[in-house]
Amino acid sequence: MTFTLAVALFAVGLIVGFYSGLIGTGGNVLLIPALDILFTYLGIPEAEMVKFIIAQSLFVTMFTGVTVSFRQYRAGNFFLKEMLLTAVPGTVTAYFVTEIIRNGNWYEKRSFDIVFLALLIVLALRLFLSNARKASLIDARPGQWLFPFVGLLTGVATSLSGLGGGVVLIPAFTDLMKMPIKSASSISIGVVAVLAVPISLSYLLADISAAETQVLPWQIGYISLGVILPLILGIFATAPLGVKAGHKANPRTLMIIFGGVVSVLCLKLVYGLWIA
């Protein structure tokens, strides 16, 4: 890897980290398109590109999720029981769907882009159309059986999209299970960190000896430490700054920023899928 490329990845990490802290929706929305551009530039075969994108995205998520969960724990906003009830079933579906993707070529780039676009639209509709319901101070005590069910669905969505899974978890917790948003966000980030572990291990331990797939620096399986390290350093550097800026910003301004980012990404995907 050239020094220029490492600096570019660090810059991407700076942007992703600040955006994640500012908006609070997770930086994978920006990270995945950036990885798409990178791997296209590096000439990774399209048949393998989806695996590389998901692998890097969720490996980064594993570290950022653990860091945020630790901060939630220290702040007294940590719900271990609910997190495990959701995450443990989710790891089963996440791992098996990942294995099916990794061991075949059926999940092509076009299918991945359609899934990513669909989840972006769901995320946008959720934020734009949901009623601004104030968080309750008392948890609604949702039925315990709903946590595993939501976890199973989230495992599938995470392994197919490379997104953290919050696009499924937050609406399910707040709208279906009537949980306070503060509790829902804490459980969500913890679940995402757990789900990223089996997916990352699957890609990390993959035996890919073919020359066309051994193209990234410090590559182990489908994961490249040469790509991951600059990204993580950049994300950790700016995420706290984004959180501070988000607390001071007008909610309408944040919504405009989010809407602009999602609109640009959707247009890019639509153009690539059906126009170009």
Image: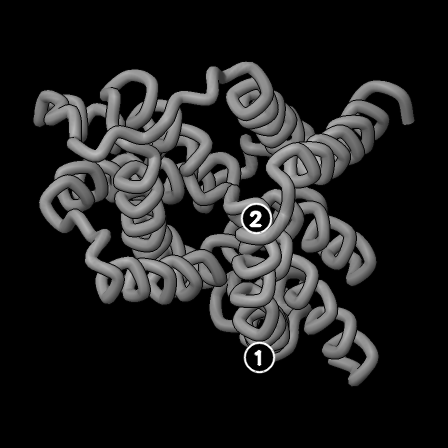
Q: Residue 175 placed where, x, y %? A: 33, 18
In the image, residue 77 sits, relative to residue 147, either above or below, namely below
Front residue of 50 and 104: 50
Within 10 Å of disc 1 (Cα), the crowding (few <14, some 14-19, many 20+) is some
Indicate the amino acid at tag 1: Trp
Q: Which residue sits at x=55%, y=15%?
A: 129
Q: Name the residue under label 1.
A: 218
Front residue of 247 and 153: 247
Q: Name the residue under label 2.
A: 28
Secondary structure type for disc 1: loop
Q: Which residue sits at x=41%, y=66%?
A: 63
Q: Residue 158 placed where, x, y %? A: 42, 38
Q: Of the two numbered discs 1 and 2 on the same chain, state the one appearing first in sequence.
A: 2
Indicate the amino acid at tag 2: Asn
Q: Residue 162 placed where, x, y %? A: 51, 43
Front residue of 246 and 10: 246
Q: In which quarter of the image is residue 111?
A: top right
Q: Which residue sits at x=50%, y=42%?
A: 163
Quadrant containing the C terminus is: top right
Q: How many labels does the image show?
A: 2
In the image, residue 177 sits, relative to residue 91, either above or below, namely above
**Residue positioned most to the bottom:** 3
Task: State whether residue 20 appears in this view.
Answer: no
**Residue positioned most to the right:** 276
Q: Quadrant of residue 121?
A: top right
Q: Is residue 241 left or right of residue 78?
A: right
Q: Quadrant of residue 5?
A: bottom right
